Each structure stands twice: as structure tokens, then as C-alpha cells.
Amino acid sequence: MKNIYFLLLLFLIFTCENINNMSLVTIEKQFFGETLDGNEIYEYILKNEKGMEVSVINYGGIITSWKAKDRDDNYQDIVLGFDNINDYETKNPYFGALIGRYGNRIAKGKFSIDDKNYTLATNNDENHLHGGLKGFDKVIWNIEEIFHESSASLVLKYISSDMEEGYPGNLNVKVIYTLNNNDELIVKYEADTDKTTIVNLTQHSYFNLSGDFNQDILNHEVKINADSFLPVDSTLIPTGEKREVFDTPFDFLQPKKIGRDIEMDNEQINYGNGYDHCWVLNKHTDELQFVASAYDDSSGRLLEVYSNQPGIQFYTGNFLDGSLKSKYEGNYKFRSGFCFETQNFPNSPNEHSFPSASLRPGEKYLTQTKFKFSVK
């Protein structure tokens, strides 16, 4: 009889341990809408055991909603976006999108590889921006659902054909969104090519941690782990200089409200109409490390960003003008959202002093960024 009790106890312990190790992160799939050319778009909702929800559509790999708790355990959506596919197709300023082949700007849409010149679309005045006229933010991704012990993932795949938007090489791209029970969303980027090309992938969510999109983000306290940033010219192309942030409006080494210096009479601020610059991160390793944070005192929400990328583009919604309708009430006004875009440096293909953005056959593009939420 003792042996039976002992075996029963072992069975209960084993069962409880395995129940505790079960994912408890669920994925719900639902119809989101139909594109103008008749493609069906679906929304995948990742939800962890605490209640955080991250919603992603197969059009553009877009994060359409991200619900995080405040200090009173109330869950609110904290990313800007739309409630229908047609607005994402026709009006989207990259809300929530995956960006590629090359995130950020390339001067005059031109670069060369091994003495061969390539020309891209100039879709940002005289420069190329975020992959061109139909970047990765406007394509349909194949999505697979995967469950782990304490997390769940959406695996997004896309094959960008040789010379698509002017980029050489057939590029196989995989992006993995993983939500765990620690209120962390981990984004892994992978790519390989059959011809030397350039790659710079990033995620372009606009955050407003207050959960009230009628408010601006000027009272958010931001910290960026960077001693220097990249000054730009009047078209927002980096000059090639790396300038120290000390005694400038670009010093976020200690937490500082976005609005403190954003109206300062400063040439770089004037060029961007606010912050729209890349910071040179203080990297000590190729592994994930803390790069930036944002805190909203009204809600208590704290966002921390970890990455192995060399730079982060901090953008303060300077081109939002109130013309875009919110997915809730009202419209998206000037500076109602900010972006933390972890990435290689803008215009790297044309600046030899910047980290290389080249990817050659046989090499693997591998980068990773983690968004961690908590309250205080």
C-alpha cells in the first residue's frame, strides 16, 4: 500500500510540474478583412496568462494592437494603428509594420555592391525609405503558429525575389514574434540570400504608454543607452559624423521627458521637426543588452528594449498631423506616438565608417530585439 501511495504522489508531482510548464500562451486567429486586390487578411492574437495581448496580421506583419496592464491592472492598447485593412493599405505611416529590405533611409536611392550600382525608388523626397514603394510592410506573409512550454510564437515567412524594389538577390526572410508569460515580446529576424545584397530589418510600432491616443507622448520619460547619435542633413540622411550627446537635446543617458528639449532651437531638432535620429548604442557584446526605455507616470507602464543591433531610431511622431482616424475615438495628432526602431545605421551602404549592411550567399542575417513591459 505504501508503494501505491508513493507512486501516486510521484504522479501528482509530475502532473503538477507539467501543468505549470504548459504554455498558457494562446493564439486566436480571426478574419481581419480583404485587401483591395481580394486577398484575405487574418489577425493572430497572442495572449499570455497575465492578460497581455499582441495582435498581428499577415499583411505587413503589422502589430495592430498591444494590450498591456497599468499599475491598477487595467489592460489598454498602447500602440497606434487602424481597425481595418484598407486604412493599412492606403494611409499607413508604417504603424506597427515589419520594415525591409532596408529600414530607414538610403541617400538618393542609390548604393553599390562590388562596384555594381543599384537604384531604388525615391519615396521620401529625394531619398529611399523603408524598402520602397512596396516594402515588407505591404506584402502578405505566411504565418505558422508554434507553442512552447511557457510561450507561443508566430513565425512569419516571406521570399523577396531578385530585384524586387531594386534590391539584388532572392532573400528568404523569417521573423518570429514570441510572447512569453513575463510580458515580453521577442522579435527575431533571420534572412539568407543567393546574391550579395543589403538587409536592415526592424519593427515600427508607435507606442503611447498612457493608453489614451488623444494625449501626446511628451511626458513620457525616455532613456537611451548611447553616448553619441548620428547628425543628419536637411533631408534626414546621416552626415557620417558620430556626435556626442553630452550638452545636447539628444542626451537621454538619464531618463528625461521627451518634451523637455524637443522644442529647443537646435539645427538637428529643426531638421527632424523633433527627434527622428539614430543613436549609436553603447554596445559591449553581440548578445541582447539594454538599449532604451520609456516610462509613463500616468499609467505606471514601463517599456524596456533590449537588442543586439548597433543603433536605435527614436522617432516622436513628428509627421502625424491629425488627418488619420484612430482605431478608437478621435484622430492621431502631432506626437501622439513614438517609435523605438532597433536597426543598423541609416544609409550604411554609402558610409564605409558605418557597420556593414551587406549579406552574402552562405551568410545568415540574425538579429533580435526584446520588448519588456512592467509597471511601477
Image (cartoon, helix red, strand yellow):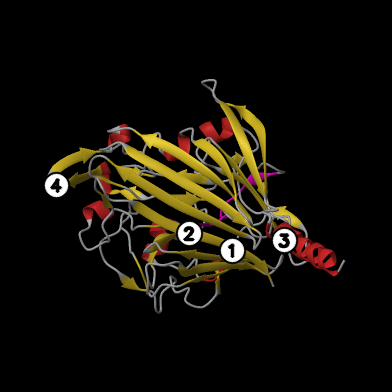
Question: Magenta stretch?
Answer: 330-341
**Residue designated by label 2:** 369
Question: Please, what is the three-letter code of the amino acid marked with disc 2?
Answer: Thr
Spatial CA distance of label 3 from label 4 is: 54 Å
**Residue designated by label 1:** 372
**Residue designated by label 3:** 20
Spatial CA distance of label 2 from label 1 is: 10 Å
**Element on which disc 4 rests:** loop
Q: Is residue 250 visible?
A: yes
Question: Please, what is the three-letter code of the amino acid marked with disc 3?
Answer: Asn
The spot of residue 36 in percent (x, y) is 54, 23
Question: Please, what is the three-letter code of the amino acid marked with disc 1?
Answer: Lys
The mark lying in front, picked from 2 and 3, is 3
Of the pair 29 and 121, the residue shown nearer to us: 29
**Disc 2 to disc 3: CB gap under 8 Å:** no
* Nearest to N terminus: mark 1 or mark 4: 4
Looking at the rendered image, the quarter that the C terminus falls into is bottom right
Residue for point 57% across, 66% down: 294
| The stretch drawn in magenta includes residue 26 | no
Q: Is residue 288 left or right of residue 120?
A: right
The spot of residue 188 in percent (x, y) is 46, 53
Q: Which mark is residue 114?
A: 4
The spot of residue 310 in percent (x, y) is 36, 64
Of the pair 168 and 9, the residue shown nearer to us: 9
Looking at the rendered image, the quarter that the N terminus falls into is bottom right
Of the pair 198 and 227, the residue shown nearer to us: 198
**Element on which disc 2 rests:** strand
**Disc 3 to disc 1: CB gap under 8 Å:** no
* Nearest to N terminus: mark 3 or mark 1: 3
Question: Please, what is the three-letter code of the amino acid marked with disc 4?
Answer: Asp
Of the pair 102 and 360, the residue shown nearer to us: 360
Q: Is residue 95 visible?
A: no
